[in-house]
């Protein structure tokens, strides 16, 4: 993208909106390029999806009410039309009861930023990527396994984004995402457990180096033994015995728990009912009286939000309102201390910030899927702070007498993130020793009870990152319902980093057992 | 011939199209002539011979959203997705998707598609069996002027009035009105074309007690905004909110359960609309594991098991017939499956009856399956729109004939636990009541359920009159999936856990 004509268009949109009567306006122009590679071709891989999609979105504020218009046409007359229509829309909305929108002040910023990556995947020729896929497939066969054509893929995305505001902020950013999924299966045994997924390919704000760092051939070398181990383990599996146990959850499992419970419940718009007709609300349903007071987890638990950690998907230099994001605690030593906010939302918590003698500041969670979607509060990157003492996964298990290990688990919760079900690969722990796999178990959790019963956290050796990407090929066919925001629904990318944890006295159930 | 020559695009005269029209007069979505103009232009700039296939999905959508009884966001958005496919030497093709209609964007897409085509392997034989004439497609009238003319002014006025209803009752409403006009087009450089415009309209609202003690929901979608009665929907959500306040907990267990039509849609959709459900292609794949219960393991030919379907077998209660017809005036949807690769390979929708009086009578398959396995020329697509037959029993009558049971407004956050039994887990939401001795006795706390539609539809007690429910297309350019279903009363529906979520 040549930024200059885009900046001119953005400025024209804002000038038009201002002269049409908007008290505030911002314009976003985006271009998203995506390349999707499958493992399905007879000669190896193939390029199944190439898309190049642009958007111009204009947001205006008139008398406390927002208007928004968008289209893919990048011409002066079009952005003028968009700006006028957005102002007219805000004005008709403003016939409603009196409403005030205050946005916390920020310094005027201009600048340019690019995701720090080593190798731009779009500069690597298509032929070279296809050759790489073919090489992996041949290599897999040579070491006695097959790469499943479904669901394996490689995906590359680049989003160029300009944000301009009527306050004089003008920033341009280029954000990269790379991800892949490579499922390896046994060539003969056709069983769900006779396959495994290669590690290190979760969506990340990285370039082609993601694949080098994943050491694919080395993982393939170990794949057959890994699958046979899993198969042998499966033969020894026992049915999960319903009851209360101490659970040790690995980092991936805890990342999912952080995302699906605290990550959802601490979105301020959800907590106040702004998403009631969409994804739902929050068990933190009285933010002002709860924040700074409510014990939501054991004192050793600290969860922070951020959009500035390298390689993580929500990381930007400026959010869609021009805010420079910082790392902010959400749960500190077990106490709820903040919510995810935008500039408008930060003022909703002003009495709390005044009480706590902190400035009201946006946490930089304003984002949108692209220029065609309105800016909303979206989930930032989240992190569960590690144990500063040495505590690897073996150390966590060593203290467990009668318990269960969950690996690679994922959680699903109700529409207030109040209760839910955690499923994953379970193994018995007896007197600190890892035992047989358990079939068909699930941890039925109550969010507060789960977090308050965290007895130990792992150190950084147990850290895992889970990326949730907004890119699903060309279209938004399937949104992750618990992550999607707004109506019309949209989704943005974020990463969750977490360490392993020990949680006492949690119910193990058979989720497939009916009443 | 092996190298695509890369050079500056030639200058061609294009038919009048969206970019040369002044912004104020620009159409909100692409007309038939616009789509033809784009295709002709693409064909004229093509290099390397072969044919050009174009698919276009163009739309305008206008919406308004409110929460806490005030409008929070609104929007007016236009977009055009254009898939350009270049077929070179008849056997290799590449596809590129863009959303700009400028000459430069179209030329760049054609060039890129040509480069990709050379990297693709040759097409399998069945793909070469392209028919030269198009299969006739149904032409339901799905365009509503009432929907198209509901502008920002009218949407805001409706939102303000509807929010006032809740505000005067002392409760909080969060609602959403959306109207949209779409066109889908499939065309090629030989002038063959399908083009269908359609509109969509939806309204849904959640009304909550200000202290979070109760919540009610109601909603519906139609292609015609004129068929939606927003006041009546708001009243229903408000009534549910007021009656659902201060719920008490009841023990999880098996209950005689009345599912309102929305709950039936949320639940039964997994049996019909969920893509792997009635699809022959995926389920008959010898590697498929697990499989949908409409398929069973056939002879074992190690290492793979072949699956046979249950076609012709009784799968649910004989009172149930499930069908999908694009011409159904209360269903009505564009007569195509999701995008085919070319106009000649479009998957044309045929009226289908998946279940007839409880017997499985049809399963979906695509055109490749039709050609390879059935020696037929056309597929039988399923995009998830469906109508389920019902009965005459009103919900009131279902209640009066229930000694002890539950009444469910809708379900949420449903996940699939086990495909082979179609076992689902999800939560009740926005209104759950206990029925005792023929009367609603109290509001009860939400619960998680663990149940299969196949079990429930074999334990049917009563059925009511089918009606259109809220099931708008998901995602920007998904095809509409209208659903018409009755309320039902089933025995022994399994609720497995309590939830304090409101």
Image (cartoon, coloured by chain):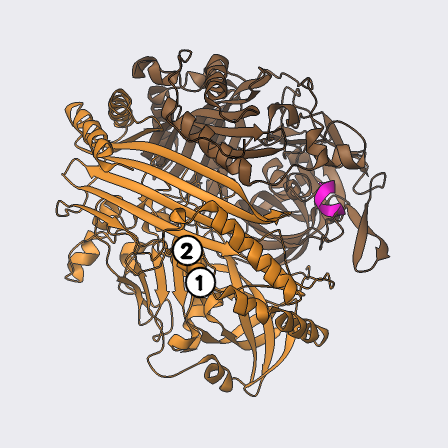
**Marks 2 and 1 close (CB-CB < 8 Å):** yes
Q: Which residue is mark 2?
A: A208
Letter of the brown chain: B
Is B429 inside the magenta-drawn segment? no
The residue shown at (27%, 36%) is A28
Q: Nearer the viewer, residue A381 or A189?
A: A189
Instruction: Name the residue carrying label 1.
Output: A212
Query: Is there any visible trace of residue B337 in the rendered image?
Result: yes
**In the displayed structure, would residue B296 be above or below residue B350?**
below
**What element does badge 1 sit on?**
helix
At a point 18% along the width and 54% down the height, the residue shown is A360
User: Which residue lies at the image location 73% right of the left edge and 64% below the top edge?
Assistant: A189
Provide the residue span drawn in magenta. B278-284
Main secondary structure along the magenta-highlighted residues = helix
Labels 2 and 1 share a subunit: yes
Q: Is B355 above or below relative to A454?
A: above
């Amino acid at each position: 993208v040549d930024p200059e004509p885009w900046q001119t268009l953005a400025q024209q949109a804002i000038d038009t909106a201002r002269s049409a009567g908007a008290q505030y306006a911002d314009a976003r122009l985006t271009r998203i390029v995506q390349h999707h590679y499958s493992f399905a071709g007879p000669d190896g891989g193939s390029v199944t999806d190439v898309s190049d999609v642009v958007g111009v979105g204009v947001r205006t504020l008139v008398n406390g009410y927002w208007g928004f218009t968008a289209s893919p046409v990048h011409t002066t007359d079009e952005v003028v039309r968009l700006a006028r229509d957005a102002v007219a829309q805000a004005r008709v909305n403003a016939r409603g009861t009196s409403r005030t929108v205050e946005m916390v002040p920020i310094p005027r910023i201009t600048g340019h930023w690019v995701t720090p990556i080593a190798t731009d995947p779009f500069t690597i020729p298509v032929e070279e990527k296809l050759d790489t896929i073919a090489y992996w497939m041949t290599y897999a066969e040579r070491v006695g396994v097959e790469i499943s054509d479904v669901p394996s893929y490689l995906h590359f995305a680049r989003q160029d984004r300009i944000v301009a505001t009527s306050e004089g902020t003008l920033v341009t950013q280029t954000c990269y995402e790379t991800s892949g999924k490579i499922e390896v299966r046994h060539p003969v045994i056709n069983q769900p457990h006779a396959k495994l997924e290669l590690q290190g390919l979760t969506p990340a704000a990285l370039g082609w180096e993601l694949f080098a760092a994943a050491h694919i051939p080395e993982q393939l070398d170990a794949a057959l033994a890994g699958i046979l181990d899993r198969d042998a383990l499966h033969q020894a599996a026992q049915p999960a015995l319903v009851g209360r146990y101490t659970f040790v959850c690995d980092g991936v499992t805890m990342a999912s728990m952080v995302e699906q419970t605290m990550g959802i419940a601490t979105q301020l718009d959800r907590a106040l009912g702004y998403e009631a007709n969409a994804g739902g609300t929050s068990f933190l349903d009285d933010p002002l009286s709860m924040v700074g007071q409510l014990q939501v987890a054991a004192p050793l638990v600290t969860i922070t939000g951020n959009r500035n950690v390298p390689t993580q998907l929500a990381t930007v230099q400026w959010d869609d309102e021009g805010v420079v994001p910082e790392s902010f605690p959400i749960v500190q030593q077990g106490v709820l201390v903040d919510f995810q906010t935008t500039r408008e939302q930060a003022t909703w918590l002003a009495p709390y910030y005044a009480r706590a003698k902190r400035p009201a500041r946006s946490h930089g969670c304003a984002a949108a899927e692209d220029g065609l979607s309105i800016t909303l509060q979206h989930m930032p990157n989240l992190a569960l702070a590690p144990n500063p003492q040495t505590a690897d996964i073996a150390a966590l298990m060593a203290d467990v007498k009668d318990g269960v290990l969950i690996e690679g688990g994922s959680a699903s919760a109700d529409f207030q993130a109040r209760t839910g079900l955690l499923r994953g690969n379970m193994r018995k722990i007896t007197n600190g020793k890892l035992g047989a796999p358990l079939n068909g178990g699930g941890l039925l959790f109550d969010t507060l009870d789960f977090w308050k019963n965290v007895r130990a956290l792992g150190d950084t050796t147990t850290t895992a990152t889970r990326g949730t990407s907004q890119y699903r090929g060309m279209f938004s066919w399937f949104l992750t319902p618990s992550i999607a925001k707004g109506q019309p629904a949209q989704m943005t990318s974020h990463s969750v980093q977490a360490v392993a944890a020990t949680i006492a006295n949690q119910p193990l159930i058979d989720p497939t057992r009916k009443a | 011939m092996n190298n695509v020559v890369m050079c500056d695009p030639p200058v061609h005269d294009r038919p009048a199209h969206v970019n040369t029209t002044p912004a104020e007069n620009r159409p909100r979505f692409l007309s038939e002539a616009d789509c033809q103009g784009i295709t002709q232009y693409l064909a004229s700039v093509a290099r390397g011979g072969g044919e050009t296939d174009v698919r276009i999905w163009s739309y305008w959508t206008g919406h308004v959203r409110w929460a806490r009884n005030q409008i929070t966001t609104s929007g007016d958005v236009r977009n055009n997705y254009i898939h350009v496919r270049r077929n070179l030497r008849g056997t290799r093709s590449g596809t590129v998707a863009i959303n700009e209609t400028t000459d430069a964007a179209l030329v760049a897409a054609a060039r890129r598609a040509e480069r990709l085509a050379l990297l693709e392997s040759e097409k399998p034989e069945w793909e070469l069996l392209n028919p030269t004439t198009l299969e006739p497609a149904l032409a339901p009238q799905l365009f509503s002027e009432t929907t198209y003319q509901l502008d920002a002014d009218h949407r805001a006025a409706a939102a303000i009035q509807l929010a006032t209803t809740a505000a005067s009752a002392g409760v909080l409403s969060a609602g959403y009105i959306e109207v949209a006009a779409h066109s889908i087009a499939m065309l090629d450089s030989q002038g063959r074309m399908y083009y269908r415009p359609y509109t969509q309209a939806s309204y849904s609202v959640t009304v909550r007690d200000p202290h979070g003690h109760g919540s009610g929901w109601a909603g519906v979608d139609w292609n015609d905004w004129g068929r939606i009665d927003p006041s009546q929907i708001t009243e229903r959500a408000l009534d549910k909110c007021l009656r659902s306040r201060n719920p008490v907990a009841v023990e999880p267990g098996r209950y005689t359960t009345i599912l309102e039509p929305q709950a039936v849609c949320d639940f039964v959709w997994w049996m019909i609309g969920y893509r792997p459900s009635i699809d022959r292609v995926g389920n008959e794949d010898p590697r498929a594991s697990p499989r949908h219960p409409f398929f069973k393991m056939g002879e074992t030919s190690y290492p793979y098991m072949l699956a046979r379907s249950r076609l012709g077998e009784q799968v649910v209660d004989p009172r149930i017939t499930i069908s999908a017809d694009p011409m159904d005036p209360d269903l009505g949807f564009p007569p195509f499956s999701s995008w085919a690769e070319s106009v000649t390979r479009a998957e044309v929708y045929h009226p289908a009856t998946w279940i007839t009086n409880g017997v499985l009578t049809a399963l979906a398959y695509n055109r490749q399956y039709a050609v390879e396995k059935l020696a037929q020329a056309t597929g039988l697509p399923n995009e998830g729109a469906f109508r389920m037959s019902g009965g005459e029993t009103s919900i009131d009558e279902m209640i009066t004939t229930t000694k002890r049971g539950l009444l469910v407004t809708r379900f949420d956050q449903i996940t699939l636990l086990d495909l082979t039994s179609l076992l689902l887990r999800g939560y009740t939401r926005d209104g759950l009541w206990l029925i005792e001795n023929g009367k609603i006795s109290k509001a009860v706390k939400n619960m998680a359920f663990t149940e299969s539609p196949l079990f429930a539809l074999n334990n049917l007690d009563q059925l009511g009159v089918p009606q259109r429910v809220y099931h708008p297309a998901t995602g920007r350019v998904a095809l509409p999936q209208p659903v018409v279903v009755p309320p039902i009363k089933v025995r022994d529906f399994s609720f497995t856990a309590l939830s304090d979520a409101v």
